[in-house]
Amino acid sequence: MKTKMLTLTLFISALFFAACGDDDGSKADLRWKNSTSSSVSEIKWKSGSSTNQTWGGTLSGSSETSYKGISVLTGNGECLDNVGDTATINLTGTGSENATILGTDATISENTSATLAFDGTTAK
Amino acid sequence: MKYLLSTLLFILAINAALYSADYKWQRFSGKWEIVNSALSENQSWISPWHYYELLNLNSLISLNSFDEYSSIDFDFNVHDRHESPAEFSISFAVRSPYKKWFYHIYSIKLSGGFWGINRASFIHSDMKDKTLKYNTKNNIFIKELASESFRLKYGKKYKASIRFEKDTVLLYIDGEKVLTGKMPSENHSGRIAISTKNTKVTIDKIQVRNNNAIVFEDDFNTDTVYVKTMKAFVEKTPQKTTNN
C-alpha cells in the first residue's frame, strides 16, 4: 500500500512538472535564412508597440539562425546589417501552409515552425 | 528578340525611377512619413537596438555630410506624447568610425513630461571602448555638456535655430535664446539627424546655412526619405510541433 501511494505521488509530481516545465509562452517557432551575399547583425520580430523576439549574432550569406519561440503570431521584421544600416523586412509572396503574408505582416500558424528567407534589398 | 527588348526597357525604366528619386534622408528607426508637406514621426514608441544612441531613438539621418555651416533652422511641433520622458532631438557632427555605425554625435535635446517640454540639453555621445567591434551592444557614453529649464507646449508650432559660433552652440526658439553649450572643439562637421522618443513630432522647412548661403534645405513637399528594405519570403518547411 505504502509503495503504491509513493508511486502515485511520484507520478502526479512528474505530471505536474511536465505540465509546467517547458512553457515559455511561445506559440510557434521562427527562424531566418539569409540567401543574400550581405551579412545581417541582428533581426527583430515586432508586433504593435513591442519587440517579441530577437536573433543576434552575425548571419552571413547562405546561413540561418536557430529556431526561437514567438508568443505573438502576427508581426513583421526589422534587421540591422553589418554595414550599420537598418532595414524593414518586406515580406513578399503568398506564404506557405504554416505562414501567411498579409500586407507587411506575416502570420505564423500556431504550433508550427516557419522559416523566413531574405532574398535581396531594395528601397521602399 | 522583341520580348528581350521590352524586358530590357522595363528594367531600365525601373532603374531610372529608382535612381531619380531625390532622397535627402535615410530612416534608421521609427515610422517617418511625409504628411501635408511636413515630416512626421508617427510611431512614438521606441524599439532600441542598443548599439549607438541614434539607434536607441526613432531616428532619421541626412544622406549628406556638411563641413562648413553656421546654423540649422527648422519649424517643429511636438505632439501626442505617449509617455515620459518625451524627447525630441536634433543631432549634428553625426560621424561614423566605419561605414554607417554613427556613434559620434552632438545633440540638442528637448525633453518633457505630461504637461509639456520643460528642459533643453546639449549632449555628446560616442563609442566608449574604441577597441571593441562596431556591433558591440551598449558600448557608448552619453555626456551632458549643458542644460536649461524652460517651457514649451505640446501641439504648438515653434521656430528653432541652432547656431554655431566657434566652439559655442546656441539654441534659439521663436527668436529667444534658451541654451548655450560648449563643444570640446570647433569641428561640427558631419551629417545631421532628427530623433524622437515617446512622442510624435512634425518637422518642416529645415535649412542648413553657412551665414546667408543655404547649404541644404528640405521643405518636405516631396518624399525625400529613403527607407531601406530587405525582401523576404516564407520558405516551405516540414511541419513541426512546439513544446506547448
Image: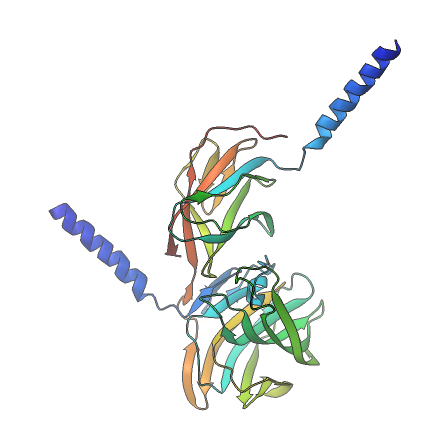
Identity of the residue drawn at 46% across and 66% down? B100
A13 horizontally vs A120: left or right: right
Measured as percent of width and height from the top left, residue B172 is found at 59, 85
> Is B118 situated above or below B187?
above
Residue at the far right in the pictured view: A2
Residue B174: in sight, yes or no? no
Residue B119: x and y in percent read 69, 76
In this picture, is B163 found above or below A32?
below
Q: Total number of numbered labels? A: 0
- Residue at image coords 58%, 30%: B242
Extreme-front residue of the structure: B131
Spot occupied by residue A42 in the image (x, y as percentages of width and height):
52, 52
Residue at the top extreme, as displayed: A1
Nearest the camera: A87 or B104? Answer: B104
Identify the colour scheme used. Answer: rainbow
Q: Position of residue A38 (x, y in %)?
A: 40, 53
The quadrant in which residue B21 appears is bottom left
Is residue B214 shown to the viewer in this render?
Answer: yes
Left or right: A53 in relation to B61: right
| Along the viewing direction, whichever of A103 and A96 lies nearer the viewer | A96
In the picture, the quarter occupied by the C terminus of chain B is top right
Instruction: Identify which residue is drawn at 15% across, 46% down.
Output: B3
- The residue closer to the viewer here, A101 or B146, is B146
Vertical placement of residue B32 versus A23, above or below: below
> In the figure, residue B51 lies in which quadrant?
bottom right
